[in-house]
Image (spheres, helix red, strand yellow):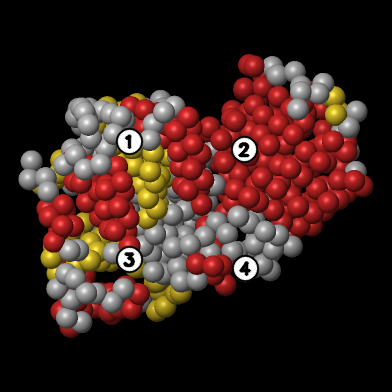
Amino acid sequence: MLDADFFRRWMAATAASVEREAERLTALDSPIGDADHGSNLLRGFRAVSAALEKEDPRTPGAILVLAGRQLISTVGGASGPLYGTLLRRTGKALGDAAEVDEAQLTAALRTGVEAVMALGGAAPGDKTMIDALSPAVDALDAGFGAARAAAEEGALATVPLQARKGRASYLGERSIGHQDPGATSSALLIAALAEANGE
Amino acid sequence: MRMLINVPETVVADALRGLAAAHPELVVDVENRVIVRRDAPVDGKVALVSGGGSGHEPLHGGFVGPGMLSAACPGEVFTSPVPDQMVRAAAAVDSGAGVLFIVKNYTGDVLNFDMAAELAEDEGIQVAKVLVNDDVAVTDSLYTAGRRGTGATLFVEKIAGAAAEEGQPLERVEAVARQVNESSRSFGVALSACTTYAKGSPTFDLPSGELELGIGIHGEPGRERRPMMTSGEIADFAVNAVLEDMPPRNPVLVLVNGMGATPLLELYGFNAEVQRVLGERGVAVAHTLVGNYVTSLDMAGASVTLCQVDEELLRLWNAPVRTAGLRWGM
């Protein structure tokens, strides 16, 4: 079973990997975006860490809802509402249970990813976060390690794609050949899930 | 790259403190990042709220004041502001007559303003939204995030602001804003990339002797790169791109807009070429504005925006305005 501590570790591991990878995310955002994805997420996850410490929510759902709200209130751009909605909707789907099992988390994450698709209008193959998140949720039944591998593979697979959503889409064919920064940060979020599970 | 800043993290807050010091007619909430005209809320009048990433100054904060915006929400550099800012701005300026959100069409701006509109309505504020999407360089809107909002934002904010100042009701102000957007088209070129503070180096690599055609205002590269062209050749390309998309029937307002690092001397020279092309194409010019209004940090280059105006829009354009960035008649 996954308890509140697990979800706290997940958010902490995500914040730590965003700290580590911020420069790389910003560099990926430079040729096909506006060179700030890393610094924006850094601001957001620092706020998440501070809020979790201050408000000390006690259930998995409450932790993710609070984290999502912080991202919406601090990140801005498209990634604030999108990542904020992902965590908020996943958290709401978990309800107020003190512990959840992996199947419940998978179902809740699927709800969260669907909410992101509805909000941003992106489908798989559009060169967005969805290209990492969607295969990761599909692979979650096989464990956190499998989900991490699927997300990383999904992020890498955005390289040859032409962007159809977000700022990279303005480049048309010139967006081809670059890894999508949003898919890359989504892979970090999923990798942190495995890390929280000690994998 | 040498920049006149303290540290990248405080660039926006520092600028807001400076704006407040220079413009006592504005209320600048540095912590919550909201710029409000001091006499807001104005009784019985519709309020206009806009916002977007910083780095486009004087847009939007420089357009707050009588005859234009009621409030602006500056985000981080090139990053949409957050819903909390927009709701705070709406609450500060709503007189009960409603608030019009003017939103440039970028995924982040649209998502955050949508969330803010919902939250503001929960607080009992009547909200209408108008999207600005005038950039003809983005052609295929089925496979992109749609056309970007660029230079036409100035026309929308000025003309809708005049309608609101006259006391027109929300649905009229919204209709005017929509008409201005639908009557406007833009095309921009970059002679250099810009440097964001987060990255500290140019956002894209543009070899000397080349230029980017069809750029946006966020340091994103354009659709096409070509060997350097003369001011006259660029004017031909840009004006024709606009006219191809919007064959003119009425006289136009012309905005020859600098991207931030191109000297006014060059912008005026470019304007002469723009006027030449318009003359050759038989387009009547009602009024021309030349300067840095919708910028992209230190990018060199320019954009051309044409807005077709009927008598009513022209009357509203000429109405008095008093803001940090645009001022006449009062």
Of B43 and A81, which appears nearest the observer? Answer: B43
In the rendered image, residue B227, in percent from the top left (x then y), is placed at: 40, 79
Can you identify the residue that label 1 sits on?
B98
Disc 2 + disc 1, Cβ < 8 Å: no
Q: In the shown orientation, is residue A9 left or right of residue B222?
A: right
Of B203 and A47, which appears nearest the observer? Answer: A47
In the rendered image, residue A99, in percent from the top left (x then y), is placed at: 85, 24
Can you identify the residue that label 3 sits on?
B186
Mark 2 or mark 1, whichever is nearer to me = 1
Q: Are marks 4 and 2 on the same chain?
A: yes
- The three-letter code of the residue at mark 4 reads Gln
- The three-letter code of the residue at mark 1 reads Gly
Distance between the alpha carbons at the discs numbered 3 and 4:
24 Å
In the rendered image, residue B46, in percent from the top left (x then y), is placed at: 27, 37
Mark 4 or mark 2, whichever is nearer to me = 2
- The three-letter code of the residue at mark 2 reads Gly
Mark 1 or mark 3, whichever is nearer to me = 1
Distance between the alpha carbons at the discs numbered 3 and 2:
33 Å
Q: Which quarter of the figure is the C terminus of chain B placed in?
A: top left
Can you identify the residue that label 2 sits on?
A84
Can you identify the residue that label 4 sits on?
A162
Circle 4 — which element? loop
Disc 1 + disc 4, Cβ < 8 Å: no
Residue drawn where x is 64% and y is 26% of the image = A66
Q: Are marks 1 and 4 on the same chain?
A: no
- The three-letter code of the residue at mark 3 reads Ser
Q: Which mark is residue B226?
A: none
Residue B130 appears anywhere in the view: yes
